[in-house]
Amino acid sequence: MANGRPPGDGSDRSPRRQRGKTANEDGLSALGRQMRSGPDAGSVANESGLRSLGDRIDASSTKTRGVRRSGKPKWSAGKKTVVALLSVLVLLAAVVGGGYGYLWYRYDQINKIHINSEVAAASGGPFTVLVIGSDSRVGESAGAAQAFGSASVVTGQRSDVVQLWRVTPSTKQIQIVSIPRDTVVSMLPPDSTQYGTYNRINSSYNSGANQLVKTITANFGIPINHVVQVDFSGFQDAVNALNGIYLDFPYPAKDAYSGLDITTPGCQLLNGAQALAVARARHYEYYANGYWQYDGTSDFGRIQRQDVFIKALMTAAKSKVNPLTVNSFIGSIHEGVQIDDGFSFNQLIGLALTYHSFDPTNLGGLTLPTEAANGFGGLGDVLTVAQPAAQQMLVDIFGSSLIAPTNPPPDAAGYPNPPPTITPTTNPPSVSSGTPTTAAGATTTPTTAAPPSFNPTTCTPA
């Protein structure tokens, strides 16, 4: 297995400056060209100029002290300090300007989608992002197509992941509510014509992200402010751009359906394809006590492992903040990632600055409370929303932003089930894992539940 270390850049040093040129003239000229025309996809803004500057500083430190070649006396220490400080400020301004322009260039490459049904969030206030993990096979490589099925075999798209990220910049909190893909909801036109009055929530995504936004708001009264959708290729590219993620497997693990095949336990580096297999595993098995044991929690177990993956990805991103890795990451994710066109460049930069010191272990992960049902004809085994537990969770997380649902989801008997009136709890949920069953039979994820001992966890290599 590859060690995941970033390869050396192998850049040659820039030639020494000739007499008569301004200090770092070549570097600043290169920066100007990059800001005018956009940098090459594989380079870092002003990389050669900065390397050249370093060479000149190294070279200048070895010069003979004393009188200049021109015969004029050297500057005093105080004068040199002032000039050096001013030079640093000018250089920083140039680098920041070039970096800002470069990030804008990369932002402009990310695919944008227009969502008619999203609403604008108050400036600086909490907002909700719908994160969709698509099972679309479009754009997959030959290897991935063999593992997961090609676009010609698995047509259309469904939402493998439906997550609502509640972001509160003032307190630097992020809470995630996952909606299991088998949760039955009320379908809206035109889905209701094709899929019936009620169907799984992931069916709605086949009509596009905007339809899924409408369905979530109509069923749960949750206004959506932004949308991010990631397909198989975008998922893998994000992991590979960070040179992989580290997960600790307490036991060997496999899933014949997702392609997961971890042969040895311990903390190990996963590439994009391996990480995708972990996040998609619904038929997870682990080898303990001499035989393969099966995790029968299906989608709930997968949601738990997706939460672990997100934390591992954030940890990898925070630990590899250098120009080369950032350039690779931003340059690769645009192929399989789409954001709504209302998610502005300045918003994204602001979020990056606000959350740059965010600890991924503080990421709150919850699953919408549901209960098993099978009274929906040809749908087979599905889940229905468990009230009042579900509404209590939504009120605690989304608060006063909630509106009255226009098309509430059905109960187990197949009748629309409007949410009850709920009073927010004093200590709303934050971090959770596990899938215990409540007295009412609802499957939920309270903060007191311990994660299953067989699931992978985040780790740091020795």
Image (cartoon, rainbow, N blue to C red):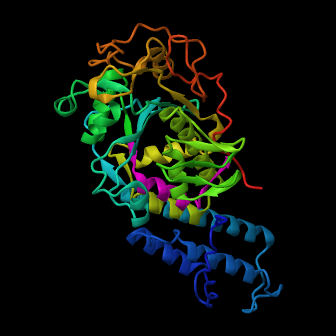
Q: Residue at x 62, y 87 (%)?
A: 17
Q: Judge whether residue 191 is colored magenta.
A: no
Q: Is residue 265 left or right of residue 219?
A: right
Asked if the stretch drawn in magenta spans residue 239, the answer is: yes
Q: Is residue 88 above or below residue 158?
A: below
Q: What residue is rendered at 48% in x and 35% in y?
A: 299
Residue lying furthest front: 290
Position of residue 190 in the picture relative to residue 92 (left or right): left
Q: How far across and how far down the image is residue 224, in percent?
A: 36, 31
Image position of 383 with respect to 355: above or below: above
Q: Which region of the structure is painted magenta? A: 228-248
Q: Nearer the viewer, residue 58 or 296?
A: 296
- Identified at 51% across, 12% down, the residue is 424
Q: Nearer the viewer, residue 431 or 369?
A: 369
Residue 234 visible, this angle:
yes
How many marks overall? 0
Q: Where's residue 24, x and y in %?
A: 59, 78
**For residue 255, above or below residue 19:** above
Provide residue 230's location: percent of width, then percent of height: 41, 48
Quadrant of the snapshot with the N terminus: bottom right
Quadrant of the frame with the C terminus: bottom right
